Image: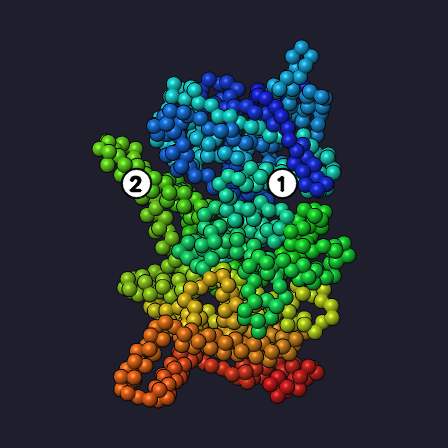
Amino acid sequence: MNLNFGVQKQDVYGTYGEFTIESENKHITAQYLLTKMKPGVENSWENSLADQMVPWREIFKIDELTFDELLQRDLDDSRVANDLIPYLLGESGSNARFFPPILAVLAPKRIDKSGILPYYPALTHQSDTSMSFGNLFEFEKHTLNGQLTPLGVLKYNQKQSALIIVDGQHRAMAILALHRTINQKWGDNKYASYYNHLQVNQQQIKNLELPVCIVFFPDLYEGNQALQTQGIDLKSVCREIFVVVNKNAKRISPSRELLLDDEDLAARMMRNTLSQLKDRGEDNSSVARIYSFAFGDSLSDADTRKSEVVTGQLEYCTAVVLHKIHCAISFGMKDAFNLDESTKDITHSRRTKNKERCEDLLRGTELEQKWNYYDRFSGKYHPLQQVQLAVNLLGNLTDVVLLPLFDQFTPFAVYNQAMREVYQQLQTPLLRTEEIHIKSFNLLFEGSAVQAIFEDHIHRLKDKLNKYQEEGKPISDYLHNQLKDAKNTLKAVESWEDKIKLNTACKLFSIECDRFLDNNSENEKKELLAKAKSILDAISTQAFQLGYPMTIHSIVELMIANNQYTSYEERLRVTKFISQLYLKALNKYFSSSSDSLHHTLTGLITESRINVFNPSELGLRGLLHLHLKELNESQWIFFRYAILEIVHCKYSYQGLLEELNSPENQDLAQKYLRILPSIIDSILNLRKEFINKGIDTSIKSKEFNNQLELQKAQLKGQSLLDEDIETQVATIIKTKQIEVEKLAKENIKASLGELADKNKILVRLTTNHNKTEYNSGFVTGIDEFL
């Protein structure tokens, strides 16, 4: 029976069944056909199915992909080429050559760009035994002697449909690689180099088959208004299936879970933030780009990377960090925004489920009237349009702080610019024709997981080489050439990375790169890179990236503390003001007082403030180092303190004044000056607290106490009275306390240029302000501030 004449469709045969996807009032039917595909040149329907089957990465281009469409793990082509294919070809010593079924979804392809459409065409035919969705596909249950059988046929339009692998992509890729190789169908696929060594014939693969479960959703068609209103489409259903089928398989990474989580409002906000970093145009080379944010399955997921999140990598932030920040800002406990609460951490999930915080933030919006439930995990509880509105509103309160930080904060901005210069250089027509530079581009700008897979590929090749040598087997030219090519590629990538790091360091310290390299030694180059690295490493930690927005929003809470009612729009205005105010001051701190370009290590790089985040030098990080050696995410509180010290110090306050003296937002400038004494009190209290922590840690240290015990033993050997011994021990302890306190203050002075007291900080900000604070009725003079 042919349900749609005139359109050529390819048949697929198998056994059919169905299941449902349900949650609360949502119910979707899923039907499936269990069938098979085969590699080969026989032009059978099984071969055609292998032509049509694609991994997620081939139907969605990364630069056009939204983060609601990102599903699959990064495909490890090295594992497929070196482990799975040899197993299928009987080269691994295994007798059985079989894979369990993969799962694929039938979806309509987009015509205008990569990706899939959200819905099938409207139903054009439906009966008890068959259905048809326009020119896209049709399904028919087979009957025999008037009785239904478990057999069915799926007829799909090869040009308009995509069969996207949702589960089992590595197994599928092994079959697809063999099929593409024997049919010479790799084309310009950038992953083909992993499979160039394959030499297969029809005889080797004639008995290979891969079971395939093809799923389609009869309810998801154009015109089904009920499901469209609920926001249920092919992408969301695919996400649901992917999460479900992987729950008991190899655990997907935390970042991948967040990309697939529709219940957690903060996860949706994170995806919005990442999406804003895509397609940012070429107007400004210093803005942050998506390739600087890890969101795959390697670097962004590990709990073990809580400290130096992206040290040594080209990414400086991760999806997981963005999620934590959104959780903290939109659902953090109230006490965490109190500057004087230095023990109220916000990195644990139980501290980011504050419904009252979310309710406060949404005051004055239409959701204030519609919502009575502000749970973080209510993404599937409220109507879709309301959820999207909440995500946009709440997420914006974080994004107006984070995006300017990543775009405009000098250390990030110069790094972004250096990255973009290499990106554009590798995209020039000349370099795009050279394979090694094509590979370099892919490894540098398509995510850390791509580079991790490539490095695993090199390890596999080396292991294979060592194994052959140990067994006395001949080494093939292919293996030698692959290793040589991989090492050359890695060397090229490292060269580009070195260029990025050097250009970043030179831009940061206003040094002319070419002339510096011509006139300075290797040791001076290493010193330049080390100075820049200490800054970039610190600002790339979860601690700093959580501490900065928490600083801004803590000040916002002080700004609106006396308001009986603060609307969302007013809070957003205050947040933008404080964000710009502090960013201006931070950039003053990390800027040279001269516009001159240097050719040697002179200027800003010689100033002690540049070591502010270097634990091995005198500076604020050195202050923290007195009592805490390892920097982890919970130290965001330290960075809140450090940022407050920095923006009010003598190197930065002119940046504050520029914003405070701006004719715009003068009402907010006045409010800031009114709370300034309270802010400075908090800074000085925190300063004292960190000094005391350093002293306490030193006094309680095992090393110091061993010295005390040795000193006591020596004093007893001199036949001194116990009281005299205790007096001398107390003197030793007091001396140590004074020594550590002095060192702590030296660390502070090295970064701030002085140990300014409250009066000094207030005077230089208030007396240099445009005097409106004295005649506006808010205050009458500096005495009132004090």
Q: Nearer the viewer, residue 368 or 493?
A: 368
Specify the color scheme: rainbow
Front residue of this view, candidates 54 and 716: 716
Residue denoted by label 1: 236
**Image point 31% across, 44% down: which residue?**
488
Using a 10 Å C-alpha cutoff, classify the residue at mark 1 as few (fewer than 14 neighbours), some (14 to 19) or many (20 or more): some
For the residues labelled 1 and 2, the Cα–Cα distance comes to 41 Å
Q: Which of the image's four quarters has the N terminus?
A: top right
Residue of label 2: 462
Amino acid type at mark 2 = Lys
Residue projecting furthest to the left: 472
Query: Farthest right residue?
Result: 369
Residue 156 x/y as whole percent: 60, 24
Residue depicted at x 56% and y 67%: 344
Does dot 2 land on a helix, a strand or a loop? helix
Residue 33 lies in quadrant? top right
For residue 685, side relative to residue 567 (left or right):
left
Q: Is any part of residue 328 visible from this angle?
A: yes
Question: Is 461 above or below relative to 548?
Answer: above
Q: Give the secondary structure at mark 1.
A: helix
Q: Is residue 25 left or right of residue 514?
A: right
Query: Tag 2 or tag 1, which sits nearer the N-term?
Result: 1
Q: Position of residue 6 (x, y in %)?
A: 64, 19
Give the number of the disc on residue 219.
Answer: none
Residue type of the residue flagged with mark 1: Ser
The quadrant holding residue 79 is: top left
Pinpoint residue 572: horizontal percent, then vertical percent.
66, 63
The residue nearer to you, when weighing 717 against 399, is 717
